[in-house]
Amino acid sequence: MSERRVTMADVARRAGVSPTTASFALSGRTDMRISAASRDRVLEAARELGYRPNVTARSLRTKSTQTIGFVSDLITTTPFAGEVIRGALEAARERDHLLFITEAGGDRAAESALVHALLDRQVDAVIYATMFTRYVTPPKELYGRRVVLLNCLAPGFDAPCVVPDELEAGRDAARALLAAGHTRGIWAIGGHQTVPATPEGIIAGNERMRGLEEVLRASGARLDGVIECDWNTPDGYREVTALLAAGHRPRALVCLTDRVSMGAYQALGEAGLSVPGDVSVVSFDDQDIASVLRPALTTLKLPHYRLGRLAVELILRSGPLEAVVHRVPMPLQERASIGAPAAG
Amino acid sequence: MSERRVTMADVARRAGVSPTTASFALSGRTDMRISAASRDRVLEAARELGYRPNVTARSLRTKSTQTIGFVSDLITTTPFAGEVIRGALEAARERDHLLFITEAGGDRAAESALVHALLDRQVDAVIYATMFTRYVTPPKELYGRRVVLLNCLAPGFDAPCVVPDELEAGRDAARALLAAGHTRGIWAIGGHQTVPATPEGIIAGNERMRGLEEVLRASGARLDGVIECDWNTPDGYREVTALLAAGHRPRALVCLTDRVSMGAYQALGEAGLSVPGDVSVVSFDDQDIASVLRPALTTLKLPHYRLGRLAVELILRSGPLEAVVHRVPMPLQERASIGAPAAG
DNA sequence: TCCGTTTGTTAAATCGGATTAGCAAGGTTG
DNA sequence: CAACCTTGCTAATCCGATTTAACAAACGGA
């Protein structure tokens, strides 16, 4: 990009020393003896010329580019994305690293191509991320490399994973309901997501439900029912409408996502039921809408920012990486959708 | 990162030629004469060894890193972000480029530091982006560099800009209302955003309003009122509630953002007014909630994906960049919130 | 005074490619 | 047959740093 940059040779020339001396002075290495006078002259010359080292050239020799590759399936789709990247970016910036962000769109071939593009540029490490917590098989190019898995698990792949603590979140949802006095009339909307596309449920669904039922059962409470459906707004609307139409009168709804909650709010509103007066709602994710719905939604926040940040922190920690699963807590965002159970 | 990579020297050795010949064969240059036999042997050797060029090393000589820097103020905050980056990423991928994504968080010093970090890594060009359309002064390090401004304008800075066509969007909002028969009882909620923080209004607000009023006036219609307020959900809720409480009975609301629309929906719902039966609503942005609100919101979409894509396309177009403002259309997403004016 | 250190500095090699300049072998032309 | 082209290939240099090895000069001790 335009005008010739000032090189170390320029600095050395101006300071009247050899490039070697300039290099040592600039890198501040103490194992090589440089007189204070020379050092100062080099530093001064560098300052005057506005010298900046060419990281590309340096890394050719040092093998370290101060650069991390970030490969994900989908950057865009709402819940994940922004915050994860922001967390990763900030952690990287604090450590003087830059991130190559890439998106493969779920295409294996594209994924391999992108990983190659990253490795060709000598990235120091790669973060392999998915937008929804799931099991993955990283592309073979990543085997033996410095990798951290973000929001996904890969049994047999030797790398640390960073995932939300969905199990504990399920427990916390139950605790929040119990604390308000709910012990019956509790329904889960969305369930494990044992829908045709994912017949065994998804990780988030399975763990949230497990934690939820575990704590409920331990307190002598239980779920009146679990409605398995997809996790979007129309699903929540449809299922809650159907539930009410069938004559049920839930006291509390555990919606598996905020989008489901929004659909539930719509159905409840149309049926003339108020939240939390008639029905309490507790949710998961803490998407933007959660705080903006009326009443504001009490939900367990997906710790996107911290996930992204932790992935970078781990990968830049010195020493070999340990294949440990790091579970990041999902904090309860207490807002206004949980109240005491309705009488009757 | 681990195991020694195969270098061009390895390929040359295996093919029994000099590194020079290998280089020419691999880069497929026709101006240097290489016999078909040698070329095939080199290519074969490269294939067998799984050779991949070291882009870092190459760019030391060629000055081109096939890399673009992306600097923005805020990546995360909703409307912008994801889609812009996705558009940029896809366009870059199609052209075998990678993107360094960075976020300065509105901090000038951090911004300069990040631009330096990018230039130190020899990026071929830089996209300077903001999350909301506004005037900017790019950091001085970017002067004279290959830059495209994304979603912002910088008079006096010699670079192309890519921005949404807010003016035409305002016109289209008016046209949508007129087409449904609305000519009076039309209120704008959010206005130019001449709030204390931005007393002169913001670009999006000013242009949307200008286009809106221009087309309305040209058809003999007009706005009954413009309510200036911030552009979030609580603002829309508060202002529409107040409007109704003051005894007004609007037939159509032009909400300056989908968030404002959501607040308007809440206020209208509480007042027992239906959309679009009693009140039509037309909005701007097309955030996620727009399609999920009931009734689904008719809105003018911010062309995030295309903005990101166009910025990369421009920057990778060969030849010098022209300081032109590229206005990307904001398509009308016709959904269910506009109806015929209520009788009376 | 001579020899071994210590100190300060630099020439040269290296990293992995791209590029320039030149060289040998074979083919043409006059 | 000498002079001149092509053709095909390679030695050497460069890009901008880091790093190794070596070398003067000053110093200290015997």
Image (tube, coloured by chain):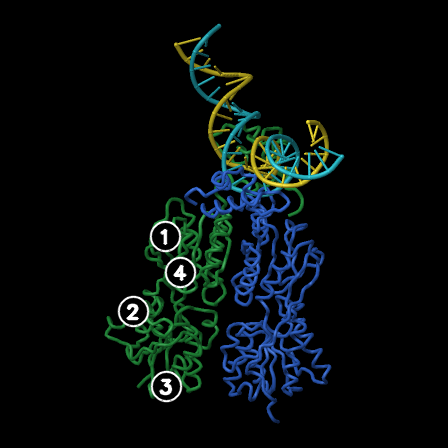
Chain colours: A blue, B green, C yellow, D cyan
Quick one: which residue is furthest to the bottom in this view? A344
Report the number of discs.
4
The mark that comes first in sequence, 4 or 3, is 4
Please provide percent x and percent y for residue B317.
Answer: 41, 47
The mark that comes first in sequence, 4 or 1, is 4
**Disc marking residue B151:** 4
Depth check: give the residue in front, D17 or B222: D17
**Disc marking residue B9:** none
CB-based contact (under 8 Å), mark 2 and mark 1: no
Rendered position, A25 above or below B227: above
Q: Secondary structure at mark 2?
A: helix
Of badges 4 and 1, nearer the viewer stands 1
Rendered position, B53 above or below C26: below
Q: Residue at x 54, y 29 (%)?
A: B36
Q: Secondary structure at mark 1?
A: loop
Residues at discs 4 and 3 both on one chain: yes
Please provide percent x and percent y for residue A113.
Answer: 57, 49
How many residues crowd around disc 2 within 10 Å: few (fewer than 14), some, or many (20 or more)? Answer: some
The mark that comes first in sequence, 2 or 1, is 1
Depth check: give the residue in front, B256 or B35: B256
CB-based contact (under 8 Å), mark 4 and mark 2: no
Q: Amino acid at mark 3?
A: Leu
The mark that comes first in sequence, 2 or 3, is 2
**Disc marking residue B210:** 2
Q: Which residue is mark 3?
A: B244
Q: Which residue is mark 1?
A: B159
How many residues crowd around disc 1 within 10 Å: few (fewer than 14), some, or many (20 or more)? Answer: many
Q: Secondary structure at mark 4?
A: strand
Depth check: give the residue in front, A268 or B70: B70
Chain letter, disc 1 residue: B
Q: Amino acid at mark 4?
A: Asn
